[in-house]
């Protein structure tokens, strides 16, 4: 099997996450997308809701899609979670499957600062997706894409091509994927809830109902642009 690993805070999960997962699933002919809500990350934020709530919201959001599953591997872990440690555990669980870790352009640029990045790129392929506010041409500075023609990055940014792959390590490839840019922000959703405003049409109704019934994000800290995201995709 080819399994896409979609890690993130999912604080909360919204249509931007879901559409990205669906497009990556189809674009790379994956067999499954495994959503992996983060536990305690190396860069905990005060507005990060409890892991069990974020896990439940993901479960509700993906219900009915037979290609989507949710993993509690990081939610159950004691101590802080690092991507490379999680991928090692998943490799043991899915011994006969190929793993492909999904991350945004911004996170890929930060990859050299992650824990054991050279081990990570040997364990799993990387799927680098477009993100609002970032361009594929920014990847020209990445040591993992040294030598890639700027024309490829420009073609992705301009929508002339939607996917290209390159050798990442002896064992794995990196896949650059241009997905639909739904500019929905989890931090914006939290801010709307805190302000008592509606969040309809930004996320599934099942997630909205869970947020309301559990009184989530009522007193969360306001989002401050420029804070570091750490080892997960969406804030």
Image (tube, helix red, strand yellow):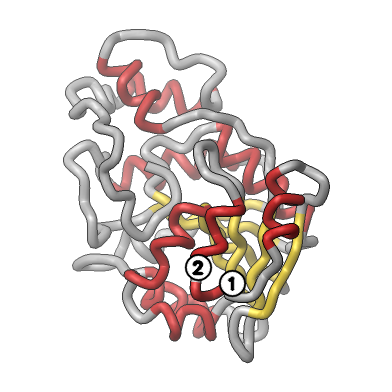
Q: On the rendered structure, is 59 left or right of 157?
A: left
- Marks 2 & 1, CB-CB < 8 Å contact: yes
Seen at 22% across and 26% down, the residue is: 222
Mark 2 secondary-structure assignment? loop
Seen at 41% across and 68% down, the residue is: 111
Residues packed near mark 2 inside 10 Å, few (<14), some (14 to 19) or many (20 plus)? some
Could you tell me if residue 70 is visible in this image? no
Seen at 31% across and 21% down, the residue is: 191
Q: On the rendered structure, is 138 left or right of 65?
A: left
Q: Residue furthest right?
A: 160
Q: How many marks?
A: 2
Could you tell me if residue 227 is visible in this image? yes
Mark 1 secondary-structure assignment? helix
Report the front residue among 131 and 143: 143
Q: Is residue 84 above or below residue 197?
A: below
Looking at the rendered image, the quarter that the C terminus falls into is top left
Residues packed near mark 1 inside 10 Å, few (<14), some (14 to 19) or many (20 plus)? some
Image quadrant where residue 208 sits: top left
Image quadrant where residue 131 sits: top right
Q: Is residue 123 above or below residue 202?
A: below
Q: Which residue is mark 1?
A: 145
Residue 221 percent coordinates (x, y): 18, 29
Seen at 64% across and 75% down, the residue is: 147
Report the front residue among 106 and 220: 106
Q: Which residue is mark 2?
A: 142
């Amino acid at each position: 099997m080819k399994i896409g690993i979609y890690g993130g805070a999912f604080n909360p999960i919204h249509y931007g996450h879901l559409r990205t997962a669906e497009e990556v699933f189809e674009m790379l002919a994956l067999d499954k997308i495994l959503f992996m809500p983060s536990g305690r990350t190396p860069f905990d934020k005060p507005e990060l809701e409890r892991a069990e709530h974020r896990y439940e919201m993901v479960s509700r959001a993906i219900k009915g899609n037979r290609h989507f599953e949710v993993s509690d591997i990081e939610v159950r872990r004691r101590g802080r979670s690092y991507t490379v440690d999680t991928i090692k555990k998943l490799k043991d669980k899915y011994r006969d499957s190929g793993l492909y870790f999904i991350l945004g352009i911004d996170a890929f640029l930060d990859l050299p600062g992650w824990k054991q990045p050279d081990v990570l790129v040997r364990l799993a392929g990387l799927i680098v997706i477009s993100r609002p506010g970032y361009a594929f041409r920014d990847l020209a500075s990445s040591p993992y894409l040294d030598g890639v023609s700027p024309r490829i990055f420009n073609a992705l940014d301009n929508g002339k091509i939607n996917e290209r792959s390159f050798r990442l390590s002896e064992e794995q490839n990196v896949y650059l994927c241009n997905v639909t840019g739904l500019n929905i922000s989890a931090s914006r959703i939290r801010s709307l809830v805190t302000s008592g405003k509606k969040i309809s049409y930004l996320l599934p109704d099942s997630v909205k109902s869970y947020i309301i019934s559990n009184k989530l994000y009522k007193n969360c800290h306001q989002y401050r642009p420029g804070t570091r995201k750490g080892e997960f995709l969406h804030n």
